[in-house]
Amino acid sequence: MKLNSGAKVGSGEIQPTFAHRISTVLYSKPKLRLRLLLAAPVTWLGLVYIAALLALLITAFYTVDSFTGDLKPGFALDNFISLFTDSLYRAVTFRTIGIAFGVTVVDVLLALPIAFFMAKIASPKLRGVLVISILMPLWASYLVKAYAWRSVLSNVGVFAWLLRPLGLDTPGYSLLGAGITLGYLWLPYVILPIYSSLEKVPNNLLEASSDLGAKTWGTIRRIVFPLILPGIVAGSIFAFSLTLGDYITINIVGGANQMLGNLVYTNVGVANNLPMAAAIALVPVVIMFGYLTAVRKTGALDNL
Amino acid sequence: MAKASPAITLRGVTKSFGKTVAVNHLDLEIGSGEFFSMLGPSGSGKTTVLRLIAGFELPDAGTIELAGTDVTNLAPFDRDVNTVFQDYALFGHMSVLENVEYGLRVRKVNKAERTKRAMHALETVRLADFADRKPSQLSGGQRQRVALARSIVVEPKVLLLDEPLGALDMKLREQMQIELKQLQRQLGITFIFVTHDQEEALTLSDRIAVFNNGTIEQLGTPEELYEKPKSEFVAGFVGTSNIFTPEQSKKLFGKSGKFALRPEKVDVLAKAKSGSLSAKVEEVIYLGSYIRLLLDVDGISIKVTVSEGVFHRDQTVQINMSAADLVAL
């Protein structure tokens, strides 16, 4: 039959094109479809994520020849022994966990009211403005923000200017200064998941709770908190893990203090001890693994 | 009805959202133990009135009294009323029993007592066997009953129901209507029921307020509303009506003015008699227990319901309408 202009609808005789045949094959083979869909990301994950982590794990058991500086493959626990026995490593590990914990707690406490206001009180227009305001700092470079805080924290900075009249002083370049800066840097990552989980809590649940006699705090504790716990956990994972891995902020605003990341950096660079660096780098990985396992046990991730 | 202390008294209540006036200077008195319905199209203000009574909204003007006590500015948790929400608003992270216990828990009732009372409430709604389930494992009708149990367990003076049957299918709805009515009788508390379904309102209520544009268009018993609608809006919203313009009334009945006539008041005759009119059948809608006909009498279309008979389009029939059945609007 003749086709005058393009395909005739309902003519019953469609000449299959090559693309059409492929579509037909794909349609009838869901498993093949799934493999094609996931081939690229799974390969990438396998190579880049898993392989790199495995390499890190294996390297941590290597040693370095102290004369030649060459890597000596093998299975030695030396690095881990010094990680646990060396007082510097121990002190830095606990300091890093302490800062990460403090930053996480402060960020969650700051994020909760902000996220609540955004999700439940602000008008849709204001909500849009707030979401953009929270995302905007993420456009700026991390370094720029850290240096901005260097100036805020300095002896002649905004903090000093604001606090000296009150008889206080700027925390300066110290652990506290680094904590404040890190808290600022990760705050958007904590607000956003909490905001999105709060947004999913229907308003009428809050009304129902109040209707049944619960005061504001009771509603927050018994209804809101359990429902947004996955969001809080997600946010805390960001703040905690990003702080655990940081080594730049502490250099810029932390004075002479070191965190785990600095130890990794110096071991890779100055000390030329790659295996030790790998062993230290595993510390945050293990801590995060422990944290996630603990969180999972509470059931907070069941409703993700 | 105990006129001395009505369950609810609204005086001059006004509520606006931006430029929209949702409730306009409303006065309303609801008796204790009454099954009271607020009926109206969406946006007529009925739900806002319910939310004002519950305390989710505060009025711009006017006062609200519960059993003679002014509660105008009290928070929901300080008001002795409870709400059954349209989509139930069950707490998904709690079991059915925990949901029902919630109101008792926040009132610091001890564990044994609150479990006992919650189980009793669940028995009342025939859900005792489901106490350990999560709301997500229940059907719509069961969720509805959990919401009811959760509200009645705290023994409110007034139960507010916001289109509680709206999400249920027809069969379940009819069953729940009967259960609601029985429950109200059993508990003896005031039910304030918001619905846009006029049939539901007629079936359940002692009295109905028909809302339109933020005010009550008419307030009365189901019979009064159906038999004596005061306005075209009520005549059209409660049941179906033929509304005759003054010209049409003049032509059909020789009476001046606007009138409403219920479709079932029109008789379809086997053969012509004095005073009967001949009409052409435009449409036949078979509805099982009755048949609805759309007739044309001299260019005036008239809705008629008959219980039986065989009709087809373009057929000519004789009808008889009595001027005594007309309701002046």
Image (cartoon, coloured by chain):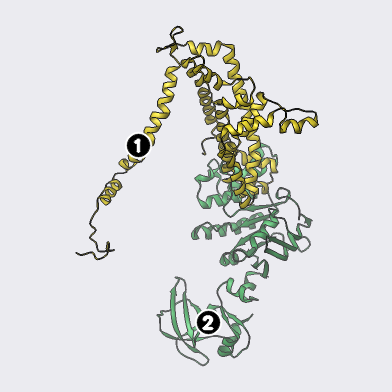
Chain colours: A yellow, B green
Comparing B167 with B12, the one in front is: B12
Q: Is residue B284 left or right of residue A204?
A: left
Q: Position of residue A196 (x, y in %)?
A: 56, 43
Secondary element under disc 2, as helix, strand or loop, is loop
Secondary element under disc 1, as helix, strand or loop, is helix
The amino acid type, in three-letter code, at marker 2 is: Val
Q: Do pointers 1 and 2 mark residues of a single chain?
A: no
Image disc number at residue A39: 1
Image disc number at residue A57: none
Q: Position of residue B152 (x, y in %)?
A: 64, 50
Badge 1 crowding class, 10 Å Cα cut-off, few under 14, some 14 to 19, many 20 or more, is: few
Please, which residue is most extreme toward the bottom here?
A: B274
Quadrant of the image occupied by residue B99: top right
The chain holding disc 2 is: B
Q: Is residue A103 left or right of residue A293?
A: right
Q: Position of residue A34 (x, y in %)?
A: 34, 41
The amino acid type, in three-letter code, at marker 1 is: Ala
Quadrant of the image occupied by residue A154: top right
Q: Is residue A54 above or below residue A187?
A: above
The reply to whether residue A298 is in sight is yes
Label 1 – label 2 distance at C-alpha? 73 Å
Name the residue beneath numbered marker 2: B266
Badge 2 crowding class, 10 Å Cα cut-off, few under 14, some 14 to 19, many 20 or more, is: some
Closest to the camera, between mark 1 and mark 2, is 1
